[in-house]
Amino acid sequence: MKSHLLPIAAVLLATFALPATAHDTNDVPRTRLEAFEATTGRVVIKGTEELGSIATKNGTLFVKVHEYRDVPSNQRQFGIAVVVRQSESMEDTTTVDEDELEALIAGIDYVSKADPSISSLNHFEAFYASRAGLRVASYSSRRTSNVEATVTSHRHQRIKTWLNMSQLAQFKNLVEQAQTKIEAIRKTR
């Protein structure tokens, strides 16, 4: 009789425990900025400055510089927050640590230069994905036969915005401005 209960218990465990586990993994800090945001029992100072926004085909893309400082240890952490907004009720934010900005910029640069010659097949997609779920991609559009781009924030919910290549260049410029601003702050403090 007990041997028949084991498969039932396994099905119940998989049904009820796995969705909770999937949700919990979304709350684990993937960046040092997220870890600072989750700090408890200590005073943390958070500085934020919006560098700019880009009106996209279906929403708005924002780039913000973040600085966190743990007051007792005076430890500081820098990075950016990329907010992808489709509407007032549909937006997601992904943070990118300072040490990942160079790779993000290089990824955007490569993605922005991709064209159909990079694949031997009819359609392509080139993308860069950050540790915390920011995804920048270009692809050959079947609809327009042009190369188009997307930026997706997939930290808490999956929100995607579509850009033309000029808007992708503006996004890269904002990320470069953020990196320059962080470097300037580091030199003065």
Image (cartoon, rainbow, N blue to C red):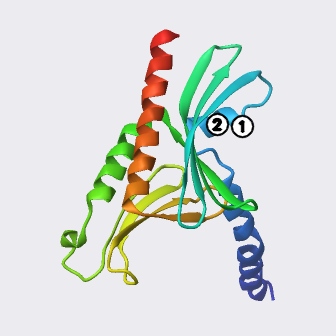
Q: Dot 2: what SS? A: helix
Residue 102 location in percent, x, y? Answer: 36, 38
Spatial CA distance of label 2 from label 1 is 5 Å
In the displayed structure, 113 sits above or below 69; it is below
Q: Quadrant of residue 149?
A: bottom left
In the displayed structure, 43 sits above or below 13; it is above
* Circle 2/circle 1 CB separation < 8 Å: yes
Per the image, the residue denoted by label 1 is 38
- Position of the N terminus, as image quadrant, is bottom right
Residue 35 location in percent, x, y? Answer: 64, 36
Per the image, the residue denoted by label 2 is 35
Q: Amino acid at mark 2?
A: Ala
Left/right of residue 84 with respect to residue 44 in the rendered view: left
Q: Nearer the viewer, residue 10 or 42?
A: 42
- Count residues near mark 1 (Cα–Cα under 10 Å), then give few for <14, some for 14-19, many for 20+: few
At 43% from the left edge and 55% from the top edge, which residue is drawn? 167
Q: Dot 1: what SS? A: loop
Q: Amino acid at mark 1?
A: Ala
Q: Nearer the viewer, residue 118 or 177?
A: 177
Q: Nearer the viewer, residue 165 or 126?
A: 165
At 71% from the left edge and 56% from the top edge, which residue is drawn? 24
Left/right of residue 172 with respect to residue 134 in the rendered view: left
